[in-house]
């Protein structure tokens, strides 16, 4: 009898339900700093990663200002060394590696799996705090006078001779590595154990495949870097002879250990962006991704092969010609799964009606720039050519075409595509397209001249250079200011969108995928009842016939 009396009370709340979402579920700073909601943790990462991006970008501007003139007249040589070291450490370890997995992986993986949260919500919050502690330690090293070793910490300079805060900065990178490991572990367990009924491996969105492969690299590769950095700190503090030949060490050993992690780390940065590209290509062509199985398995192939190519960083370090030959062949091999992805995205677009919203413009930018980065990577895999351009600006240009042209464009594409889902608000489409165009122009103006100046022989990491290289450097610095404007505009319209943006609705792109079945922004527990997946991924109407079918 009492139950019938209480039923009206139980049924009263639903009308208020739609307004309750993860952003306003509980207020106050403490509710955010102690949250175990994967979506809130993603937002915390978004804020902290953006701050590091700003710092890294500021350092890049200082570098380009120095290189406007051939004489080193803006900074001392040592200050310049510290500037590019900060730029490298901050951008690689605190922006590129965590950017897409920590923000969009955190936000979307549970939702795409049909789960209520990641497997270990508290560990997820811990990973953010660990990331922050690593970041603060690194910033402390900078405040106390900086580090001048380059982001690679090459020995024996870093372990013996550098008169800068190597140990504190190394400790910061060491600590941040644990954030990467914890995140990877969380993603692997979630994708294995928490998929909704009916969500088989080959029904998963390609975003999940990419993050699964990335997580495997994070969990297997990061400990190697952590151990290597500890060895550098021990040698520096206690004179243990690991790397310094004077005390019985081997400097080349450091390079092997460092690149054994740091080459796969390139794929930690780029694989998530490739996952984003697959989502964007499907959504804006209204098609199932061509050769879905190949694209899915190519992510796994990249993760496996990436551990076998580290020696191509060491063609000039005196390793045997036979070892170099093997690494050269393996490096060509790792290009194949990347090429599969690019060709299959192009095949998905072929004869489809593409809609040119902002995220798709970033996808086009990504494909073009990543392809240039990938092809120049084959130049560097060729021993004879690599010896000529090793440690020149050609390497800098190649690396940035992969990292900025690839990872950052992927990140911006993801931010524009899922922004309505994160915030429930739309941004200005016109301004967003304009910013994407400015970014593309600024990027190419910055980094394409560096291929030329590098091929002509300008070494990287020098603050002075022969006058004949000036015109290409001026172009590069001009491009950097255009690029800075391209990054600044989104900050303005995203802020405007938060304050005055139009409500987005659950599915502004008419896209497929579990995340688009939820309200925007989603409620705290994601799903009121567990979804059951009955259809193939990217089951757009067009997927039944033509190129979109099963391959």
Image: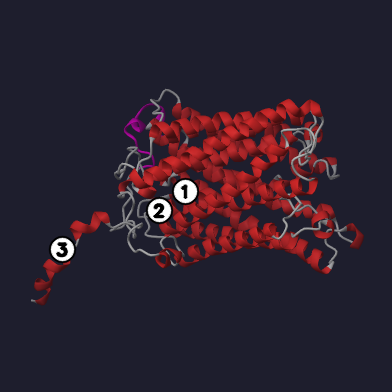
Q: Which residues are magenta?
A: 536-551
Question: Which label number is shown at residue 113?
Answer: 2
Question: Which label number is shown at residue 477?
Answer: none
Which numbered disc, 1 or 2, marks the residue that appears first in the sequence?
Answer: 2
* Residue 449 image offset from top left, x and y in percent: 68, 28
Question: Which label number is shown at residue 208?
Answer: 1
The question of residue 541 being in magenta is answered with yes
| The residue positioned farthest toward the bottom in the image shown | 2
Picture residue at 68% right of the left edge, 52% below the top: 261
The residue mark sitting in front, 3 or 1, is 3
Instruction: Name the colour scheme.
Output: secondary structure
The question of residue 9 being in magenta is answered with no
Element on which disc 1 rests: helix
Q: On the picture, is 11 further left or further right than 230?
A: left
Element on which disc 2 rests: helix
Q: Between residue 31 and residue 272, name the one nearer to us.
A: 31
- In space, the residues marked 3 and 2 are separated at their CA atoms by 31 Å
Q: Does the CB distance between marks 1 and 2 fall below 8 Å?
A: yes
Picture residue at 60% right of the left edge, 34% below the top: 481
- In space, the residues marked 3 and 1 are separated at their CA atoms by 38 Å
Which numbered disc, 3 or 1, marks the residue that appears first in the sequence?
Answer: 3
Picture residue at 41% right of the left edge, 35% below the top: 282
């Amino acid at each position: 009898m009492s139950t019938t009396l209480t039923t009206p009370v139980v049924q009263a709340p639903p009308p208020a339900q739609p307004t309750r979402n993860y952003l306003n579920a509980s207020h106050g700073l403490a509710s955010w700093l102690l949250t175990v909601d994967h979506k809130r943790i993603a937002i915390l990462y978004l804020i902290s990663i953006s701050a590091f991006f700003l710092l890294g970008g500021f350092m890049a501007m200082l570098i380009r200002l120095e290189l406007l003139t051939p004489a080193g007249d803006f900074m001392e040589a040592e200050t310049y060394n510290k500037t590019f070291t900060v730029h490298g450490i901050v951008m690689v370890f605190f922006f590129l590696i965590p950017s897409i997995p920590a923000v969009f992986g955190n936000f979307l993986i549970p939702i795409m799996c049909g789960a209520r949260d990641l497997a270990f919500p508290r560990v997820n919050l811990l990973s953010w705090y660990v990331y922050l502690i690593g970041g603060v330690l690194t910033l402390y090293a900078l405040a106390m006078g900086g580090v001048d070793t380059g982001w690679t910490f090459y020995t024996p300079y870093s372990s013996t001779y550098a008169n800068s805060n190597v140990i504190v900065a190394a400790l910061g990178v060491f600590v941040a590595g644990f954030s990467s490991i914890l995140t990877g572990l969380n993603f692997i367990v979630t994708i294995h154990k928490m998929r909704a009924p009916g969500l088989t491996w080959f029904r998963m969105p390609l975003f999940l495949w990419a993050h699964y492969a990335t997580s495997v690299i994070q969990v297997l590769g990061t400990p190697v870097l952590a151990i290597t950095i500890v060895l550098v700190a021990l040698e520096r503090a206690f004179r243990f002879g690991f790397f310094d030949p004077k005390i019985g060490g081997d400097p080349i050993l450091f390079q092997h250990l460092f690149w054994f992690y740091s080459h796969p780390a390139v794929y930690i940065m780029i694989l998530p962006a490739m996952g984003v590209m697959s989502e964007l290509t499907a959504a804006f062509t209204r098609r199932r991704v061509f050769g879905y199985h190949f694209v899915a398995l190519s992510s796994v192939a990249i993760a496996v092969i990436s551990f076998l190519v580290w020696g191509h960083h060491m063609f000039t370090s005196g390793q045997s010609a036979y070892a170099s030959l093997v690494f050269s062949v393996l490096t060509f091999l790792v290009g194949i799964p990347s090429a599969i992805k690019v060709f299959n995205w192009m095949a998905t677009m072929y004869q489809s009606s593409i809609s040119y919203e902002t995220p798709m413009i970033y996808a086009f930018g990504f494909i073009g720039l990543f392809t240039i980065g990938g092809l120049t990577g084959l130049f560097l895999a060729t021993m004879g050519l690599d010896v000529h351009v090793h440690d020149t600006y050609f390497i800098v240009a190649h690396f940035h075409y992969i990292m900025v042209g690839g990872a950052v464009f992927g990140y911006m594409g993801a931010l524009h595509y899922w922004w309505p889902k994160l915030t429930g608000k739309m941004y200005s489409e016109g301004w967003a397209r304009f910013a994407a165009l400015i970014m593309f122009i600024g990027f190419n103006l910055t980094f394409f001249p560096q291929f030329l100046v590098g091929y002509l022989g300008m070494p990287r990491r020098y603050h002075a250079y022969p006058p004949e290289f000036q015109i290409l450097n001026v172009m590069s610095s001009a491009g950097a200011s255009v690029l800075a404007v391209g990054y600044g505009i989104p900050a303005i319209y995203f802020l405007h969108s938060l304050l005055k943006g139009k409500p987005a609705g659950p599915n502004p792109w008419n896209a497929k995928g579990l995340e688009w079945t939820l309200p925007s922004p989603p409620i705290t527990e994601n799903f009121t009842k567990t979804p059951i997946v009955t259809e193939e991924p990217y089951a757009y109407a067009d997927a039944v016939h033509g190129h979109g079918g099963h391959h």
